[in-house]
Image (cartoon, grey):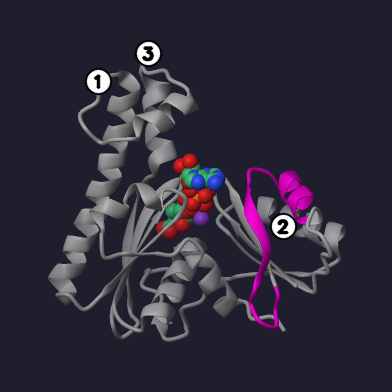
Amino acid sequence: MILELDCGNSFIKWRVIHAADCTINGGGIVDSDQALVAAVAGLSSLSLTGCRMVSVRSEEETSSLCALIQASFGVEVNVAQPVQEMAGVRNGYDDYQRLGMDRWLGALGAYHLAGRACLVIDFGTAAKADFVAANGEHLGGYICPGMPLMRSQLRTHTRRIRYDDASAERALSSLAPGRSTVEAVERGCVLMLQGFARTQIEQARAMWGEDFTVFLTGGDAPLVQEAAPKARIVPDLVFVGLAMACPLN
Ligand SMILES: Nc1ncnc2c1ncn2[C@@H]1O[C@H](COP(=O)(O)OP(=O)(O)OP(=O)(O)O)[C@@H](O)[C@H]1O
Ligand SMILES: CC(C)(CO)[C@@H](O)C(=O)NCCC(=O)O
Ligand SMILES: [K+]
């Protein structure tokens, strides 16, 4: 069994797969290193043979999580590293080491699945878009605040925007103009994300006509689905790229 970890800025996504047939034994989303160890240790008949990880956290946070995994489960952690080229995809950054590894692995996974030009849009703590041309050239992308950041900026920098998580969730039953603060903010931010997606798709169309595949991923992808009706929602896209970057036997 292999432990796969995607360490984002706010959450760690994890899953345990069977190496032989790639079936999934368990998985989830946690918000701390300790919660991760507890969740993985809670799997019945766990016998890990390896671990692969992608992290957009600092070197210190990443190595301390690696040490914790090694101490808790007795496996080495294989951390995906930046490269200029892999699996037919060429990193498009001036300095390839600066491209976020979650974005790079998403691009690798998408190009592998689509086998043609693709646009990857990832709605996590940050929203990001990446373009990969039909010949595998990564053309670069965009980074914006995602839903959690937009929301918390408004809450932090205004005096009269205050509401709880339960009313936030209820507010998203429709996108009609808001008739309360929570509706106005939550729906407004979703429309920003949808506008981001539409603009990226327009740009892809201007370059590639109809010959491209759109992938949506990240925790808030479902909020944007209606703005991108032809998109493939692939919640584990980063894990597809991670398996390519860190093959384990
Ligand atoms: N089951 C879930 N657990 C946690 N967050 C969820 C869940 N479902 C949806 N979300 C939403 O997904 C968003 C976080 O997305 P994601 O987990 O992809 O972020 P991240 O990986 O930490 O961020 P980034 O990739 O930008 O570093 C939050 O807005 C959160 O509300
Ligand atoms: C943009 C984030 C924060 C999204 O998780 C991550 O991909 C990252 O830290 N990237 C480094 C900066 C860049 O990609 O240009
Ligand atoms: K992520």
Where is residue 16? Give x, y as percent. Answer: 69, 65
Q: Which residue is mark 2?
A: 63
64 relative position to 209: left or right? right
Q: Which residue is mark 3?
A: 159
87 relative position to 198: left or right? right
Where is residue 8? Give x, y as percent. Answer: 55, 52
Q: Amino acid at mark 2?
A: Ser
Q: Nearer the viewer, mark 1 or mark 2?
A: 1
Q: Nearer the viewer, mark 1 or mark 3?
A: 1
Disc 1 residue lies near ligand 1 with CB under 8 A: no
Q: Which residue is mark 1?
A: 179
Identity of the residue drawn at 80% across and 69% down: 48
Q: In the displayed structure, would residue 138 be above or below residue 225? A: below
Q: How many marks?
A: 3
The answer to whether residue 39 is magenta is yes
The one of 239 and 77 positioned closer to us in this rendering: 239
Query: Which of disc 3 and disc 1 is earlier in sequence?
Result: 3
Query: Which of disc 2 and disc 1 is earlier in sequence?
Result: 2
Looking at the rendering, the stretch of residues picked out in magenta corresponds to 18-40
Identity of the residue drawn at 21% across and 55% down: 198
Q: In the rendered view of the protein, which quadrant contains the N terminus?
A: bottom right
Q: In the displayed structure, would residue 49 be above or below residue 5? A: below
Where is residue 91? Give x, y as percent. Answer: 40, 75
Q: How many neighbours does mark 3 have within 10 angstroms: few (below 14), some (14-19), or many (20 or more)?
A: few
Q: Are marks 3 and 2 in contact (CB under 8 Å)?
A: no
Q: Amino acid at mark 3?
A: Arg
SS for tag 3?
loop
